[in-house]
Image (tube, coloured by chain):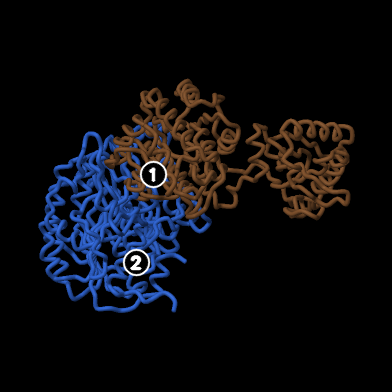
Chain colours: A brown, B blue
Amino acid sequence: MRHQEILARLAQPAASRIVLLVIDGLGDIRTADQPETALERARLPNLDALAARSALGRIVPVATGVTPGSGPGHLALFGYDPTEPEVDIGRGVLEAMGAGLQLSPQDVAARGNFATADAAGNLTDRRAGRIPTEECRRLVGRLHAALAREPVPGLEVQLEPGEGHRFVAILRGEGLSPAVSATDPQRLGVPPLPPEAEAPEAKATVERLRRAITVMERAIAAEPQANRVLLRGFSRLPHLPQLGDLHGLRCGAFAGYPLYRGVAAACGMRVVPCGKKFAETVDAALAHWDDFDFFFLHVKQTDAAGEDGNLAEKVRALEEVDAGLPPLLARRPEVVAVTGDHSTPAPLKAHSWHPVPLLLHGPYCFVDGSTEFSETAAARGHLGTFPSHQLMGLLLANAGRLAKFGA
Amino acid sequence: MRHQEILARLAQPAASRIVLLVIDGLGDIRTADQPETALERARLPNLDALAARSALGRIVPVATGVTPGSGPGHLALFGYDPTEPEVDIGRGVLEAMGAGLQLSPQDVAARGNFATADAAGNLTDRRAGRIPTEECRRLVGRLHAALAREPVPGLEVQLEPGEGHRFVAILRGEGLSPAVSATDPQRLGVPPLPPEAEAPEAKATVERLRRAITVMERAIAAEPQANRVLLRGFSRLPHLPQLGDLHGLRCGAFAGYPLYRGVAAACGMRVVPCGKKFAETVDAALAHWDDFDFFFLHVKQTDAAGEDGNLAEKVRALEEVDAGLPPLLARRPEVVAVTGDHSTPAPLKAHSWHPVPLLLHGPYCFVDGSTEFSETAAARGHLGTFPSHQLMGLLLANAGRLAKFGA
């Protein structure tokens, strides 16, 4: 039986609070050139003191050796096994969430790129020379205007400019399907691919979409750089079992960036607006202390610093989190977990497959003698190393929210 | 492929003995108020000396965060994955085993409670004021007498009084089914529920059972406190593959309490009568040294002490086990495993989800440098942390009872 299903069968009510603090990209690595990780280098008096009253361990977001994206990394923390097909969040949906767009269950989202084609219609640059964001905004305006002049029956297209050559497309209309193939051929010297139906129910979608693409490309045909649109990652909000139904939890999400709010909402959390600084995130959570049983707090800056290869900035972001912890801990939530959705080691300048350090504090967590919160202390902790999607089991158990399995 | 199935395919004979010593509720935790676990506090010279010639590790009975009942905890130790539906032992069957009743594969067992209803028939106490055990015995006598006077065709009901308001009901007859819903509504102010068929084949069972309940409740209608019976956990012995067939083992069970004998018997072990003290358990095993390849020895007192929150008694029970080990070890069984079916930390006063320490001694176990048997030593041991139901693999391997997988 799947782990989430076992937990759901055992759900029992309790008057306890669970705080899940996700420090994005938390884990780091030691290399010849970087002898200390960010956690090792940072001064973290509050986290270290908490570690001394906690159990440490490590979690593996997807599978051994597998680097997760932000979607799967967070879904795993919320108890979903990201390798299960129905847990998949498509690229389009994730981009739409990241742009802060509201999706209804019927909407189909796709990721878009502006691209360059030559006179023969063959692609010469799949990213249109990475046009400036302002230029992207102007071009999206032209596409919108063209679609307003020449609407495609049965298809409403909402476009949201992103950074550089990127944009998000949301398709709305009766009977749409996300079973549509990508139009990006992933190579140069050939024209963009027409979208194809990957299932019979997508025929109407594809027909309408081809007409919309024609309208859009006609509108930018005379542009010197960005004269084509490429679409991929057609997808719809996944039907995820909701955390309230599964575990009887009232869940609040406190995240400064839209992507994480979107993933949390897809799991049934209530998204509470809050700022991007950790102190603001904590303030928002404390202001809603009686509204929720489960508090998801998200810190983005650590991941951004890791992606930039900026160890000093990652250290600074960790120290900011540490400094912001006391008001949260002073409210004495029964269970506190501090971890990440994945590692973003500064030497890699990217997400990685390395297990993520985990600190778990609760009345029965087993105080394991750790004296600091670091990758190495975590590797030696009593919680061991286990899949991220099983963390919810420990959170619920420590919160007294799971009945005994069998007699 | 399931682990048990892999092992079964590789079974090969050997002249080795395996001793599996189950110290019930063995694992404990450190908290702010209990800085040492029972294993850490106890003086265990024999276990510590054995640890120095052994490999340590930890086992997870059901799944991360999941607290097992005694049934699943033991089935996992015997190699069955308790999350597989066909491994489920129902509440009624477990209670019947705990009462020492013999079940045939056709029998349906249920757990019973005496309860109190008011003049309108609505429940006022689902436990009949926790009547004394003697009173329960008297009432069960009245029920039996009434059923003897007014037998229900096709249904023989055997009742066994338990502690306080509890009893066990065994239903016998042609064509019975355990797919029967509970009659306990789990709340007050409403009448008991009539049993309902949860599958078409249970219709006849339900019809006969309703008549039996009418006869029984009429017999106690004038009782001031216990004037209703509530039944739940209708179940039948699971059809478990037998250990002898799976692994070619002659298995003997040495347990002082009926529940553990019952679970062992359900797996195909031969139950050998023995006393409740550890020395008596060891004596019985040694008296049957040539009859078995696999010896399951069970110690109950550690779990009982943990449930009472009595660390001192748990320490004493561990020291009693330690003192009783030398005669067993002197017979030089090839493989000795010391572990538990689950943790019962004294601070929790209940079973828990924490991994269970494991000591494995055998000629090729890998002496891992442990110097004591404790939760922390186990967390650092060479065996790592793995599912309890895979322990059988290590027992069989160390006993030379598994052929190579593939060429």
Q: Is residue A51 left or right of residue B372?
A: right
**Are the residues under badges 1 and 2 in a single subunit?**
no
Quadrant in which the C terminus of chain B is drawn:
bottom left
Residue at 16 percent of width and 71 percent of height: B332
Instruction: Using the rendered image of the protein, determine whether residue B192 is visible from the camera's viewpoint.
Output: no
Q: Is residue A48 left or right of residue B28?
A: right
Parent chain of label 2:
B
Circle nearer the viewer, 1 or 2: 1
**Residue at disc 1, secondary structure:** helix
Front residue (pair A131, A108): A131
Question: Which chain is home to disc 1?
Answer: A
Residue B376: x, y in percent? 25, 48
Amino acid type at image mark 1: Glu
Query: Which residue lies under the disc numbered 2?
Result: B393
**Residue drawn where x is 26% and y is 46% of the image:** B344
B186 on left or right of B203: left
Q: Residue placed at 76% from the left, 38% from the top?
A: A172
Q: Is residue B398 visible?
A: yes
Q: Position of residue B102 (x, y in %)?
A: 29, 62
Q: How far apart are the two marked residues, 1 and 2, measured between alpha carbons? A: 32 Å
Q: Disc 1 designates what residue?
A: A375
